[in-house]
Structure formats: structure tokens, C-alpha cells
Amino acid sequence: MEVRNPLPQSLEDSNLTKALRLRERIAADITRLQSGRPAIHHLRSLHQHSVHLCGYKTSSARCRDLVKESLCDPYLLRRFEDSRGLNWSKQASRLFPLKNPGKNNSLLDAVSLYMWGVCDADSVLHAALYHTLAESSAAELGLRRRAARYRAPPLPPDSGICSEEWQNIVKTANPKAKAETSMIHFYQDIYLHVLANITRRPIIVIAGKLSHLLCVDIYLRFKRC
């Protein structure tokens, strides 16, 4: 008979009260630049924090396996290790991808999960992303279109993003709209650039298929076994 893992299957499930308080603090921490352009909605102080696990090297092997089984994604771990996208160096500590239980935007959920251990269930980061785009222009954010891809500064002289396309970019980011997944992925470069400014943190991404996009910041500093 299969033995069920007795541990919660996500960090937020381990303490729902704390998860609720964290979401309230995140929402209260978002602010907008009072002057100057672009009109970036950003974190005041919570960008300085990252969730982490206490050391458990002294725990039994069974206990360590249960923790990894509860919090990590074995399918993605195998996928990225097989493609040598993760843990290819024998000198570095082995890193483990976290499960992303969020049902909203996978990128925003991954960033929120890494930084605070909870998904962006209330769409706080999603709303900040949308309002930053809606209240700014592509030129103010330093974005240009080049060969059907988007690049952040420094940029060579390029053709700018036309107003019609910018409206589509903003519309796609609206948390109240049901944008096509393909369009969200197409504009992912822009959203990453703006989100890095909102969270005031660097964001590196490892991805196989676009549907499996994950925030590498989760790997870099969140969980090491």
C-alpha cells in the first residue's frame, strides 16, 4: 500500500494564517513612484527578504526525502538535469526546483514563491505589473522591438514599439482579462524586464517549453539540500 506523504504539499499550506498575513503585507508594501517617469509600482522594503528553509542535514534520510517530495518538482528536476540546464557542475551545490502550485501567471507565482513562500494568489504583483505598463510608455521603460524580440537597455538604435502593439501588451498583462497563453509567452521578455524593476531584484529564467517556465532565482538561493 502506498504511504502518503504526511507533510503539506507547499510552504503556504504549512501555515495558512501566516500565508494570509504575508499576502496582506505584500499588498501594503507596493507603492508608486511619487515623481518622475516611468510610473513604476514597486516594493518598498519586502524586496530585501527571501524565504529560506532551516538546515536539516542532521535529520534522517527519510525526513529529507519527505521534505524534497513535498516541496520539490521531481519531473522538472529530471528534465533540467537531463538537458544539463541545472546541476551540471560538480563543484556547485545541487539545486532543486520548487513545486509551483499557483493557478495564475506562472512567472509571477514563481517570483512570489521564491521571495515570500506564497503564490501571487491575490494578483498583487500581477496588478503592479499591469499598472506600471498602463501608466508608462515603451520609450519611458526603455523598451524597443528588434527582430520580433524585446530587449532591455543597453539598446542599439531600433524601431520603437507602435502604440497599437503597446496597447496589446498592456491588455495582455491585465489580471482581469483572460489573455491567450501564447500572447503572454510572446511578451514574456517585456514582463520580465518590468517585473525586475517592480521587485527590485534580478530575475534569471530557466525554461524548457514555455509552459514550464520557471524563475531561476528560486533555484539560486531558495532551497539547497
Image (tube, helix red, strand yellow):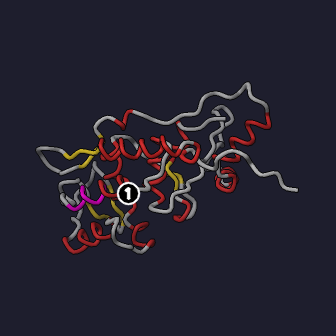
Q: Is the residue 73 above or below the residue 50 in the image?
A: below
Q: Is the residue 172 above or below the residue 153 in the image?
A: below
Dividing the image into 4 quarters, which one contains the N terminus?
bottom right
Using residue 83 as the reference point, say whether residue 136 is left or right of it.
left
Which residue sits at x=40%, y=67%?
184
Decide if residue 184 is in sight here: yes
Q: Main secondary structure of the magenta part?
A: helix
- Where residue 20 sits: x, y (%)? 44, 46
Q: Please state which amino acid type lies under the numbered disc 1.
A: Ser
- Where residue 219 sits: x, y (%)? 56, 42
Residue positioned most to the front: 17
- Where residue 41 sits: x, y (%)? 25, 49
Which residue sits at x=22%, y=58%?
157
Q: Which residues are magenta?
A: 129-134
**Residue density around tag 1, few if under 14, some if 14–19, many if 20 or more, within 10 Å:** some
Decide if residue 217 is in sight here: no
Q: Quadrant of residue 201?
A: top left
Q: Nearer the viewer, residue 209 or 107?
A: 107
- Residue that label 1 marks: 123
Using residue 115 as the reference point, say whether residue 166 is left or right of it.
left
Q: Is the residue 12 above or below the residue 173 in the image?
A: above
